[in-house]
Amino acid sequence: MPCTVERFDFWPVLAPDFRLLNVSGLHAPFTPRILTRCTLSDGSVGWGEVPCNTGVIRVLRTVLPEVVGTGISAEESARTLERVAARSRELSAQFALTDERGSATFDRGVTNHVRAGVQMALHAAMAQHMGVPLCDLLGGENGRKRNEVRFNLYLFFLADTAGSGLDYSYGKPATPRSEFEALRETVVMDAASAVRLAKAGVAELMPGVKLVKWKLGVLDPRAELAVMLAVAEALGPAVQVVPDPNAAWDNETAIAVIRELKGAIGEQLPYFEDPVAGRENMAIVHRETGVPLATNMCAANFEQHEDAVRKNAIQITLGGDCHYIGGSDEAVRLSRWCAANGIGFAQHSNTHLGISHAHTVQMGAAAETHDWPFDSHYFPWQADFDPVVSAPMPLEFGGICRVPEQPGLGVEVNFDGVMQLHELYLAANRNGRAYQNRDDGPVAEVVYGGWVRPQNRAQKWFLAGVPREAL
């Protein structure tokens, strides 16, 4: 009897998070995620993980029962995913849901996450059924392209939340086991504290790493320039530094800062991520500075990537994010498109657990090219207290993760850990809806008393929205 999809389940969960600042606000103590599980008729199981919002939950409740009973051949699974995307778009319109990438650092889209949640779990189960690692299935006829995937060290400014009533301690070690763990519990808002965090991260968390990315769009751009100059000097020329202001700057500011930074550190600045908003503005900044620009904002789908190439707005994409592009298969397809169009390929990251990280490794091994280290929130911020996987994929010297040889996703999912974080989600939302949708704005308002969202002010970086008396 042909193998079919026997069950398809999902659970909203909360991932413990840190006091990470960005242009859109401040991360809450928990970030909502959705874990999906596909069970085949032969007992094979695959897991997926995507960002959570109420729209995704509502659509998944309708769509997943329609996947049960479908076949798992290449042709049948492709038709299933086409139907899932079409149904999601139809239901999103019917329910009047936001179904686009948007301008925030987090994504309120629906169809990209619904399709990704189905595809990731379905393909992981299919790979287990076939007895091969997921990357061999994703790679198509030629299989995987590599056996290891490189990651950068992804660092943030850290807010002072003392006296706010917010508790970020859930799941964290009671006593820091390293200088980096101690420093990530401190306030990081200037060059000196940023240097300490970066040096500890490189020395202890990712020795041998070749690229450190820093989330900007928080301080005044001149202050952030000083931070990047200090971090680059402290790490030395062997470690490249990539800033990401999340489109917080105007063209004039971006051109001036990029020129000064490039002039000071040269090849230590390999590219700059999303200095300004929109493909037209990105093209202007690249033309005026000559520095390669990367995005996870102004090109979120294939049509937008094609337009970005026509305008010469990007030279690198971080659109290989399995969640935002609609699945790991779509990320691999984007990598092939990038190779054909001379665009560097990497992937964006957001707060996530070990299931997402495993999918990122499998996708990276199957991708046509692996031009730049991938972003990962996981190892600096979630990996050492993640209850969802029995053990995360080990991180080797240089920020490398090797592809596990076991069939399927390559990590063992701890169902008790899934239920632990699901119960946390249910308890947090029992008397309200504080953690049903990812939103960094309300938390910023709690801590900074009257913080104004960037779309409602002229200057977009985070501190420009903080009332003077709250500083």
Image (spheres, rainbow, N blue to C red):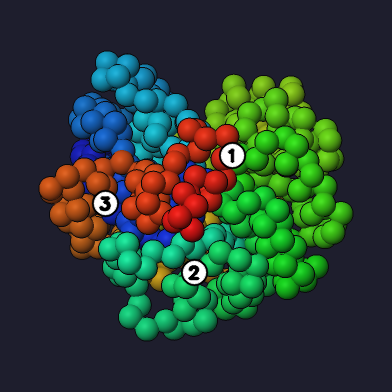
Q: Which residue is mark 3?
A: 13
Image coordinates for residue 454, horizontal then vertical, percent = 50, 38
Q: Which residue is mark 1?
A: 459
Which of the pair 453/425 is nearer the observer?
453
Q: Nearer the viewer, mark 3 or mark 1?
A: 1
Q: Amino acid at mark 1?
A: Gln
Vertical relation: 464 (above or below) 231: above
Mark 3 crowd level (few <14, some 14–19, many ≥20, 10 Å Cα)? many
3D distance between C-alphas at marks 1 and 2: 23 Å
Vertical relation: 271 (above or below) 54: below
User: Is residue 415 among the parts visible in the rendering?
Assistant: no
Q: Compare marks 3 and 2 and give the one earlier in the sequence.
A: 3
Which of the pair 222/302 is nearer the observer?
222
Image coordinates for residue 389, horizontal then vertical, percent = 34, 63
Task: Please say if the residues under marks 1 and 2 sit with CB atoms less than 8 Å apart.
Answer: no
Q: Is residue 448 left or right of residue 454?
A: left
Q: Residue at x 44, y 41 (%)?
A: 452
Q: Which residue is mark 2?
A: 187
